[in-house]
Image (cartoon, rainbow, N blue to C red):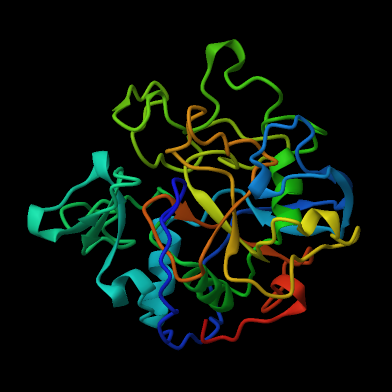
Amino acid sequence: MTCCSPSTGDAPRPPTPVTPSVAPVAHDDVPLPGGSFLMGDAHGEGYPADGETPVHEVRLEPFRVDVTAVTVEMFAAFVSDTGYRTEAERAGASSVFRLALAASRHDVLGIDPAVPWWVVVCGADWRHPFGPLSRAEPDHPVVHVSWDDAAAYCAWAGRRLPTEAEWEYAARGGLSGQRFAWGEELNPGGAWMCNIWQGRFPSDNTAEDGWLATAPVRSYPPNGFGLYEMTGNVWEWCADWFGATYYEESPSVDPRGPQAGDRRVIRGGSYLCHDSYCNRYRVAARSANTPASSSGNCGFRTVAALGGGPDRGRTSAGQSFPASG
């Protein structure tokens, strides 16, 4: 388990078979032109173990990217069409932020004393993000989805997860070397531009930005590419395996991460990020989690070929995921 997003060391459970849809849910996405950009931390503010340096030039082909994270409503359409059950549902439990807990005492399976703000809760899943006494809102980002669950959704929708390089290029919104998706200042003019923690972590969230946990998509101003919540709200899965030294050897054209690994990249930070312990709400910030892990602060967005047709199967290192997820 990490401070950012709780981990499970469990092996992925056999997935529910997924058949690609002939009429998947519509994705509100925008075309990005591709080209070259500088990837990595230009300010020296990252954690050394995260491997945010060296800054390096990357060239990408054009692609399309979702304007928002995949919402509960979108994921519900996938489940309705396929009968898919997420890993959290099959396991019967997932990790919930303690202050947002909506469950009976007997539903709480455990608390990790090292990170006591996370509790493992029976019945916590994408429909019940804070425990069995909660209900997911249709316009919030879907959470309690593992990397494998996100890949299964992509197989159904004819889309894919972004590579880490595509994600950072999209998050920067055309800005070069800036800390955040909107510029250098966290709160320009005193305004909150993203959903992160305010107050004293982890006991007191003043919720100055309006939200204790997830916010609806499109709650904050978009970046220069018209993309919402690239920073904060929920972590977003990327296609790549994580490598702390990958930037030292990353190819300059369309990098897709290491060939193998034990954790997948997550990007963007979440509503739990706070500079007192985790400043990973910067656009260069990286983290990772095991593919079978799920929690109440991790979701995903998707990308597709520029032509808008099916983009079934490219993930990291040229590998493909099957329609079974």
In the rendered view, tell whether residue 111 sits above or below residue 26.
above
In the rendered view, tell whether residue 134 sits above or below residue 284.
below
In the rendered view, tell whether residue 116 sits above or below residue 260.
above
In the rendered view, tell whether residue 206 sits above or below residue 301.
above
Observer-nearest of 103 and 191: 103
Tell me the quarter of the image containing the N terminus: bottom left
Q: Is residue 278 left or right of residue 225?
A: left
Does any portion of residue 225 appear in the rendered image? no
Residue at the far top in the pictured view: 189
Q: Residue at x 80, y 32 (%)?
A: 177
Q: Is residue 72 left or right of residue 310?
A: left
**Which image quadrant is residue 6 in?**
bottom left
User: Picture coordinates of residue 185 (x, y %)?
Assistant: 65, 19
User: Picture coordinates of residue 202 (x, y %)?
Assistant: 34, 33
The mark total stands at 0
Observer-nearest of 234 and 8: 8
User: Picture coordinates of residue 97 (x, y %)?
Assistant: 31, 46
Q: Residue at x 28, y 47 (%)?
A: 113
Q: Is residue 211 left or right of residue 157?
A: left
Q: Is residue 159 left or right of residue 112?
A: right
User: Picture coordinates of residue 221 (x, y %)?
Assistant: 58, 30
Does any portion of residue 200 appear in the rendered image? yes
Observer-nearest of 317 and 187: 317
